[in-house]
Image (cartoon, rainbow, N blue to C red):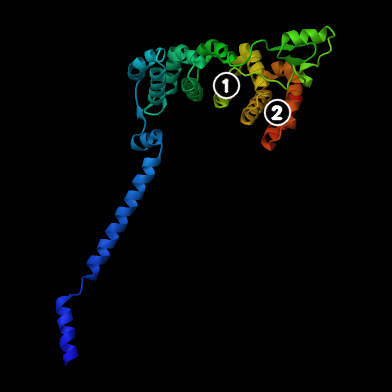
Amino acid sequence: TNIDEVWEAMNANQPIRNISFVAKNKKVTKVSSQKCVTNIEKSKMPKSQQQAIISAPKSISYADIKTSISRDLNSIGDENPIIRKKSLQRLYNSLFVEHLIGEEEYDELFNDICKPILKRFIDPVEKCRELAHSICLKFFNNCQNFVPILGYYFPALMQQIPSGIGYDSDMKIFISDMAAHEAYKRGKAVDRQDRGGTAGILTHQVVELSEEIRFLSCKALVSLIKRVIVLQCSPILHPYFQEIVMYLQTQLKDPFPDLKVIACEALESLAKVSDFETGMKFFSVGLVRALLPVLRHRHAKVRLAAVSALHFCMVV
């Protein structure tokens, strides 16, 4: 009897809790913890990804987009490098992230703003050069009419490689040092430039010090070539075919492996198009000789790309 009385007194002092209420609280706590994890993961994302998640691109007319970017377009030539960088970044976001316009509008827009953008290819600030190449790459992926801008694009592109590069049609070799080549033809005891040596393929000069920007520049050119092939308007590149080949064979000597790979892919794309057959036949022997050193690269993906490009250059 004493035990029963003690038990009733304990129950009176400590009532049994509602189990469903406890389970409900636990469930709510679990859901709130999941939300906290989601917010933490979202906070770790770059600002560009957060902006893409929050707001989707909005359709806008040509007149409105031209008005919205006019201030940033004027600021990319400012003397202050910070202002130039921020203006290029806002310009990139306005054209390709925040707004959505048609292909015809992109054609007119690129024709209007290509000159100040191409001038940033030689900007002293690396980030500004990178943004300028990225804008050109995006335009090449979205435009249809490239004729008005090619005359400005290729001179700016050729400034990215060393001067003095040429092609000897008699010996079928590409030349990187004209003085050394003339000395070789006169009988001086120097190696031919496609066979290596101190003045040959073992040495390579670069104008753009950043290998990422060199890769981005070549990627933009490859995007232009592929876009033109898809649109079936390859003849518009005929006046600039020599510049394209000179630029690509220079990238075959670049120390950056990914740049070698994309240059080989570009040569392969050119060799597959019948409109470029005459030009590829003219440079085919020189390109094969330029590709041979790439076959000895230590990376398998580079050797594989070189073998594929070599095949199409030989059977063109």
Q: Quadrant of residue 268?
A: top right
Which secondary structure, mark 2? Answer: helix
Query: Residue at image x 65%, y 21%?
Result: 248
Residue 26 occupies quadrant: bottom left
In the rendered image, residue 153, in percent from the top left (x then y), is placed at: 54, 14
User: Whole-Å distance between the Cαs marked 1 and 2?
Assistant: 26 Å
Of labels 1 and 2, earlier in sequence is: 1
Where in the figure is residue 173, as x and y percent of width and height? 76, 16
Q: Quadrant of residue 160?
A: top right
Q: Contact, CB < 8 Å: mark 1 with mark 2?
A: no
* Quadrant of image for the N terminus: bottom left
Q: Mark 1 points at which residue?
A: 209
Is residue 161 positioned above or below 183 on the image? Answer: below
The answer to whether residue 131 of the structure is visible from this angle is: yes
Q: Nearer the viewer, residue 143 or 288?
A: 288
State which mark lies toward you, 1 or 2: 1
Residue at the image position 54 percent from the left and 10 percent from the top: 151
Residue tagged 2: 309
Q: Residue furthest bottom?
A: 1
> Residue 75: image x %, image y %?
38, 14
What count of labels does the image hold? 2
Amino acid type of the residue tagged 1 in the rendering: Leu
Is residue 230 in view from this perspective?
no
